[in-house]
Amino acid sequence: MGALAVLSCKKAVNEESNERKPLSRTFTCVIASDDPDSKVAITDVGKATWEVGDKIMLHGGTDGADRKEITLAAENISADGKKATITVEGLDPYDRTPDVVSTYYAQYPASCVPSGNLYYECRFNNTNERLMAACNVGDTFVFYNVAGVISFRVSGDFDSYVFAGNNGETVGYDVYQVRVRDDGAGPYCNYWKPGNGSGEPSPLTSISGSVIADGTTVNYIGLPYGTNFTGGFNMKFLKGGEIVKTLSTSSARNVAYGKLLPLGDVTSALKNYVAPSNHDATNPAITGATALDESGTANCYIVDGSVAGNANKVFKFKAYKGNGTTNVGTIASVEVLWETYNNAESVTANSVIAAVDFDKQDAKEYYEICFKMPATLHAGNAVIAAKNAGGTILWSWHIWVPATTVTYSDYGIYTAGKAMCDRNLGALDVAVASAETKINVTSVGLVYQWGRKDPFPGPSSIETEGEYYGFAAVAGANPAAVTTQLSVEDAIKQPNTFAKGSSSWTTSSDITLWGDEASKTIYDPCPAGYRVPNRVKDNDNQLFKAKLSSAAGWDYNATKYWFTLGSPATVFPCSGYCDGGSFKATFRTVIWNAHPDGDNGYNIYVYAGPAFANYSHAKSRGYFVRCVAE
């Protein structure tokens, strides 16, 4: 790649290098010819022609900040469909592109282009498509297929599919990056990888999509570069989220970059789906379960890790959405997504929760999530997810196993009779206000993006001010930080994705996710009977004073990372903040309340002494929650 850059720099700068202002350009977009010897050619029925309605994304400008989406109309497309002529207004060329021949880049489909700057490359946030990428040579773009493709036809009463390798192979990424270059001899693709330089990509072991099951229409599955199935692959065909038929192969197959694997009509190879046998009382993760939701359902349930009798004990709760009574849907499986000890210590799988399962008796209208504690209790936090037959997460719940019993009091700083938790949500013990010893990282708690129900692990350490630390160690799935936004629905399906695409993590403008000054919502992360604090501008309520340092019990220690409020005083850790994949240890803490401020949320903010309530920060930040009574 370095040699290519040197060659590029030796090329004479063409007339495009002087383009530094918005202009009108007409380009011809050509789909690469079907060359069986070219690794970038899709044979047979791959994407070979432009169609009316196809959307192309062009980008350029300083650091790839400018982009234009073009929708093809009939008059744009040549008779054979191989070419499309488009006119683009006001799109600057790249002003410091690594190769002087190409000054614009384009990619298809535009729906798979993530937000953010693109930097002379083509990025995609969905690999399950027939992806194409191009760079310009003068006024021409040559588009190349940059993914492997499987095609199939099928007949039946289905509306979607789930595709996976039999040995857990990676079949997709949430971010995919391709570089098309031209050193003067014509465009070519010389680079592809998962990720975009801003956080680790999430490899996917299954992908899904809609299906047209009329026996005639060709359906496509897009796969990233060089997907090698060592023991074949399988497909599930679903109707309304329920599996109807299955297809399985056992032979090793490779779907090469830019190549097509046509399966033809697979209808005759389908088999009826046989559901797993019903769970029964012989399952050790169900037997004799104690209900945790008798006082109310929630997104968080506490099992006291200091109570010896909780060892080997089985607990259960209804599979409802948050604190409501709405079923999450038809559950096909449950799993522990991750467990943590709230520090950098390596976590042994099933040491916080030993086993998890689900149950549904015929007489009940709801499922129950059941889990068993280990024989030796270990303080920590865990997240349990329920999935449908297609592997999609329907809902997830936080199991909090503190090392010491959680208590509640108004501390003289909250509304009389409305108790506040003695620690941050997910903290394993109470922070100690010591002049000699720094607070323990296990007393910090978990972090939340404003309005989301699911936690992320807290920091692995808070030893030195100004240093950056990662998430606490986990067993299971590590959090994935992405630069794109999520819808509320997708956030439910991806509870482990820390979305920091902009000030707000969500594409929705919903300001009621945590209820503001109304009732507790299904997205509230607190245990039953408690909630994220309301925004209360009442100086009699010390927790929400405009300046906390004038409140009763105020004290602050910048070198030991704590502040206190109330009488008797309660301790708040000053443990920094999370802005994606890392925490910055600073003499500050930020604690969310339920009030929104556009793309921001309000909070209690303490930094190096000054302390304010009803401060405003981006909803995409990872801050702490101190639950209060409803």
Image (cartoon, rainbow, N blue to C red):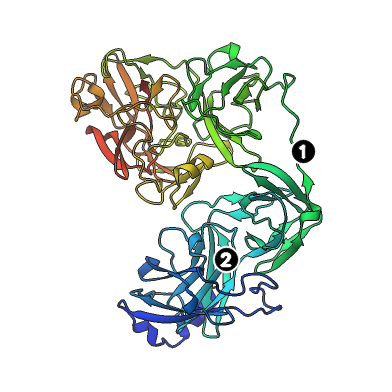
Q: Which is more toward the observer, 438 or 577?
A: 577
- Which residue occupies 24% across, 19% down? 553
- Up-down: is 298 above or below 194? above
Name the amino acid, label 2.
Answer: Leu
| Residue 487 percent location from the top left of the image | 45, 46
Query: Is residue 608 among the parts visible in the rendering?
Result: no
Counting residues from the start of the chain, the first of labels 1 and 2 encountered is 2
Q: Secondary structure at mark 1?
A: loop
> What is the quadrant of the N terminus in the image?
bottom right
Q: Residue shown at 69%/66% (left/top)?
A: 256
Pointer 1 local density, CA inside 10 Å: few below 14, some 14–19, many at least 20: few
Residue appearing at x 63%, y 73% in the figure: 40
**Residue at image mark 2:** 131
| 439 or 334: nearer the viewer | 334
Circle 2: element type = loop
The residue drawn where x is 69% and y is 73% is: 43
Q: CA distance from mark 1 to mark 2?
A: 35 Å
Q: Nearer the viewer, residue 12 or 488?
A: 488
Compared to 3, does 232 lie above or below? above
Three-letter code, disc 1:
Val
On the image, the x and y values in percent for residue 227 come to: 68, 59
| Quarter location, residue 555 | top left
Residue 274: mark? 1
